[in-house]
Amino acid sequence: MADDINHQGGCQCGAVRFEVSGAPKFVSNCHCHSCRKATGAAFSTWVGFKDDNVRWLTREPSFHASSEDVRRGFCAACGTPLTYAGDQWAGETHFLIGVFEDPTGLTPRSEVFTEDALPWALSRKEN
Ligand SMILES: [Zn+2]
Ligand SMILES: [Zn+2]
């Protein structure tokens, strides 16, 4: 399957770079209010990996606790939002799809927190 390949990625300036291996646990569009604020985008496409399959090549991101049990990783040099880790999904790192060098093989399979979604962001699915 196209998803099951090694992926490298990083922030816009290149200070934070990573590599993941194996198939992602999921690829999902999240419409929640917290992700909207954290990324500045209408919704966020997340690609989840087990921490064991994640390797930081340069340095790890900086973290912001967007709530008590959630750590959002970003590059302190250029501000690119990169990752999400929460107690609810312990042992996993979720990456924003746009930080991968080649995200073309990663296809979202689900829409989550649709109760927070902007109406037009969901109608796109019918196309
Ligand atoms: Zn950067
Ligand atoms: Zn979210």
Image (spheres, grey):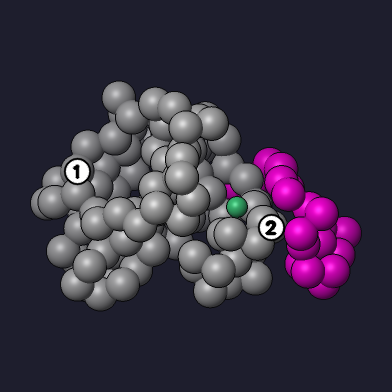
Q: Amino acid at mark 1?
A: Trp
Q: Secondary structure beneath disc 2?
A: loop
Residue 63: image quadrant is bottom left
Left or right, 83 with respect to 127, comes to: left
The answer to whether mark 2 is within 8 Å of ligand 2 is: yes
Q: Which residue is mark 2?
A: 31
| First in sequence: mark 2 vs mark 1 | 2
At label 1, counting other C-alpha atoms closer than 10 Å, the crowd grade (few under 14, some 14-19, many 20 or more) is some
Is 123 inside the magenta-drawn segment?
A: yes
Q: Position of residue 103 (x, y in %)?
A: 46, 54
Residue 100: image quadrant is bottom left
**Is any part of residue 95 visible from this angle?**
no
Q: Secondary structure beneath disc 1?
A: strand
Left or right, 7 with respect to 68, comes to: left
Give the residue displayed 56% in from the left and 59% down from the top.
Answer: 35
Give the residue displayed 46% in from the left and 40% down from the top.
Answer: 69
Give the residue displayed 73% in from the left and 49% down from the top.
Answer: 113
Labels 2 and 1 touching (C-beta < 8 A)? no
Q: CA distance from mark 2 to mark 1?
A: 27 Å
Q: Position of residue 37 (x, y in %)?
A: 55, 69
Magenta region, residue range: 105-127
Quadrant showing the C terminus: bottom right
Q: Amino acid at mark 2?
A: His
Q: Which residue is mark 1?
A: 56
Q: Position of residue 34 (x, y in %)?
A: 58, 59
Left or right, 98 with respect to 119, comes to: left
At label 2, counting other C-alpha atoms closer than 10 Å, the crowd grade (few under 14, some 14-19, many 20 or more) is many
Give the residue displayed 53% in from the left and 74% down from the top.
Answer: 40
